[in-house]
Image (cartoon, grey):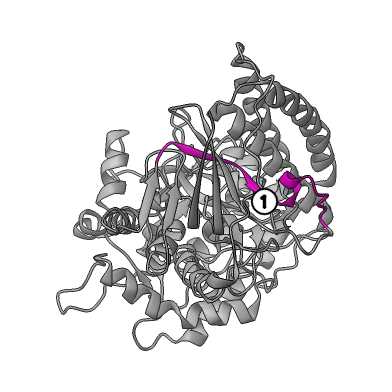
Amino acid sequence: METRKKVDFLVIGSGIAGLSFALKAANYGNVCVITKGKIDDTATKYAQGGIAAVVYHPDTYEKHINDTMIAGDSLSDRKIVELTIKESTERVLELIEWGVNFDKTPSGRFSLAKEGGHSEYRVLHHKDITGFEIERKLIKAAQLNENIEILENHIGLEIITQHHLGQNVSRRSNNIECYGAYVFDVETKKVTTILAKFTMMATGGIGTVYGNTTNPLISTGDGIAMVYRAKGVINGMEFVQFHPTSLYNPKESPSFLISEALRGAGAVLKDFNGNDLMSKYDKRGSLAPRDIVARAIDNELKISGKEHVFLDARSIPHNQIFQHFPNIYAKCLSAGIDITKDMIPVVPAAHYSCGGIKTDEWGASSIRNLYASGECASTGLHGANRLASNSLLEALVFSHRACVDAVEHLNDVDFCLDVPDWDSEGTVHNEEMVLITQSKKELQQIMSNYVGIVRSILRLERALVRLHILFQETETLYKKSKLIPEICELRNMINVGYIIIKHAMERKESRGLHYSIDFPGHRDESPLLKDHL
């Protein structure tokens, strides 16, 4: 028998976006947080670099705003950028109140790092495991809050709208409402109908759509796919950020991230001959924005036929390595690489989606009573390329603003009691897992080979044709199969892959993270890269 429950706030996802929203919403009503794995199985946990915020002179809000606009290739919404940056200091102070410890100098000042695209030192960090520190402190606070219920191993299937009441809904509709979500309990195999006055989508990224990614395996684009199927507006999915420096280790998945902060500390990208790789591509060298560095490495690999380039951190003082990058040092050492003596083999990997569920300045989506925050959202902050360490900040700012907006309307929203339970009539157990695993491999190959760092119209057209076949096969299998996590995730990944391809085909230019050989780039600040591509 299927179950039902009612909550004031339903939060789908347990990273920084979901938990910071839940902690604030709990002051005004009961909150249910669902997460498809363990509560700490999030992308937030793996964030190494830190969180960007204006803290000390000579840094200013205007400098941070300009750096963000430049990195976003002028496609960022300046109004959104300004409000995000100007609220950064207050949001960071809230993290400290929740118990987050940022590194400090002996004098007691915050130890600030500098990353690619930043004109000042402004990245607060906790060694090279900032996300881990933030996640564990937020989890502790949430677990101690009596108004927050946490359901682990629960997968969001669909958000509930008028469609489930038998009403027609289309992408042109401007009155779609969210009543909650259907949620699959992995352990009991039951589907719960969770009715909510407000739903926060905080499901993270889409990295596993690609074969090589720094994202955890849970990053299958679930929230974006759910909102897309509910006819919500999705924006900017052509802008997928590939982190330039993941540790080259073909046997390991996901790929281990080598933080940009290491380059900020003085590490230099080099080719197989030991030459400075980036000097011939961009005047800012190894600290150019990520899209430029990733394309330069991609070009270098294609020209040389090599499988990786090198990151040389040998010039960084050893005590700085041990003190600020202990996790990176230990990981590389476990792979036989002593970064104080050896260069690190690195390769670009899918890292961050700058697009997602389109929201307004309050984190509200195009569907009423549905909010989105974190990587699954497209707030307008990142534009065509995310500035390093702006993502954790964005999640904090828009989860806060979403809570403010939801609470203001809390007494105006009632539960929809006419929602039917989930219908699984006629489904059977799928006896051939190979159908799912093979389709996933095909999807990842299609996306990596045709919709990667450098694209073309021909590649995108081929990808779309092949993906359509996978979509039809998977939908047929899904409709007749008993639910298991693998089929749910595959379906979402295919949906997301389709959106990325469609958005890439619609953008008739090269911009930021979307580079097409059919539409040469226009970045004035990187003429050297244009010459090579």
- Viewed as shown, does residue 150 lie left or right of 220? left
Q: Is residue 164 above or below residue 118?
A: above
- Residue at the (43%, 77%) spot, across then down: 88
- Viewed as shown, does residue 518 lie left or right of 386? right
Residue lying farthest to the left in this orientation = 106
Residue 345 shows in the view: yes
- Residue at the (75%, 62%) spot, across then down: 521
Q: Secondary structure at mark 1?
A: helix
- Residue at the (38%, 80%) spot, across then down: 90
Which sits in the foreground, 48 or 159?
A: 159
Residue 456, how many percent across, how many down? 80, 46
What's the magenta region? Answer: 152-171
Which sits in the foreground, 287 or 384?
A: 384
- Viewed as shown, does residue 84 lie left or right of 510? left
- Residue at the (41%, 85%) spot, across then down: 59
Residue 286, how many percent across, how many down? 49, 61
Mark 1, other Cα within 10 Å: few <14 / some 14–19 / many ≥20: many
* Residue under numbered circle 1: 227
